[in-house]
Image (cartoon, rainbow, N blue to C red):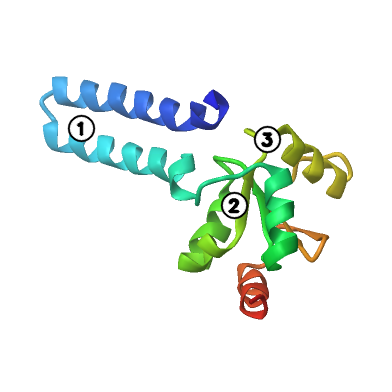
């Protein structure tokens, strides 16, 4: 679990250090602005932006019942963030698996990507697609009940 929060915590610490330096140099406006930018970067790269993750076994089970795609992702992945943002509210209809929290999810991604943990990997009807176009994923959501 700490691995998922490493980048956001580092962004917060670095932003706080630089902002403190700017404030101590009598540049409070710049310090606050710098801190806000780093806080925003930390939030965007944290697991908070994504729907709640479930484990791979549960995601496969739910997908077999409702036909919705499974998305394997990890925090800090810009392509995962792109997919999440472009899906908008529809992202909550997918089953999300954080491969850093679930070893079975990481193994599923490696099996689909020749041993690499390339994310996002979206599984639709049992077939994996690596880094698919968000518009295509949205289409897959519209065809599921």
Q: Nearer the viewer, mark 1 or mark 2?
A: 2
Chain-order first, disc 1 or disc 2: 1
SS of the residue under disc 2: helix
Q: Is any part of residue 132 visible from this angle? A: no
The residue indicated by pointer 3 is: 102
User: Is 57 situated above or below 89?
Assistant: above
Displayed quadrant of residue 40: top left
Residue at image mark 2? 80
Mark 3 closeness class: few <14, some 14–19, many ≥20 residues within 10 Å? some
User: Helix, strand or loop at disc 3?
Assistant: loop
**Residue 69 quadrant:** bottom right
* Residue 45 point in image, percent of width and height: 47, 41
Q: Which image quarter is the N terminus in?
A: top right
Write down the residue under mark 1: 31
Secondary structure of residue under mark 1? helix
Q: Tell me: 104 left or right of 39.
A: right
Residue at 67% x, 39% y is: 99
Residue 35 position in % (x across, y down): 26, 35
Q: Are marks 2 and 3 in contact (CB under 8 Å)?
A: no
**Could you tell which of marks 2 and 3 lies nearer the N-terminus?**
2
In front here: 94 or 61? Answer: 61
Identify the residue at image location x=53%, y=24%: 2
Of labels 1 and 3, earlier in sequence is 1
Q: Is residue 127 above or below residue 29?
A: below
The residue shown at (49%, 60%) is: 85
Which x, y percent locates residue 98? Answer: 62, 41
| Residue 12 x %, y % | 36, 29
């Amino acid at each position: 679990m700490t691995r998922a929060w490493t980048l956001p915590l580092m962004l917060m610490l670095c932003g706080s250090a630089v902002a403190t330096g700017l404030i101590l140099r009598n540049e409070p406006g710049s310090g606050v602005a710098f801190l806000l930018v780093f806080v925003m970067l930390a939030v965007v790269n944290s697991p908070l932006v994504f729907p709640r993750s479930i484990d791979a076994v549960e995601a496969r089970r739910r997908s077999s019942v409702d036909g919705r795609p499974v998305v394997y992702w990890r925090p800090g992945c810009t392509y995962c963030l792109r997919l999440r943002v472009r899906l908008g509210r529809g992202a909550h209809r997918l089953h999300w698996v954080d491969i850093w929290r679930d070893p079975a999810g990481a193994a599923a991604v490696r099996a689909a990507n020749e041993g690499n943990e390339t994310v996002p990997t979206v599984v639709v009807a049992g077939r994996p697609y690596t880094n698919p176009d968000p518009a295509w994923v949205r289409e897959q959501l519209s065809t599921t009940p």
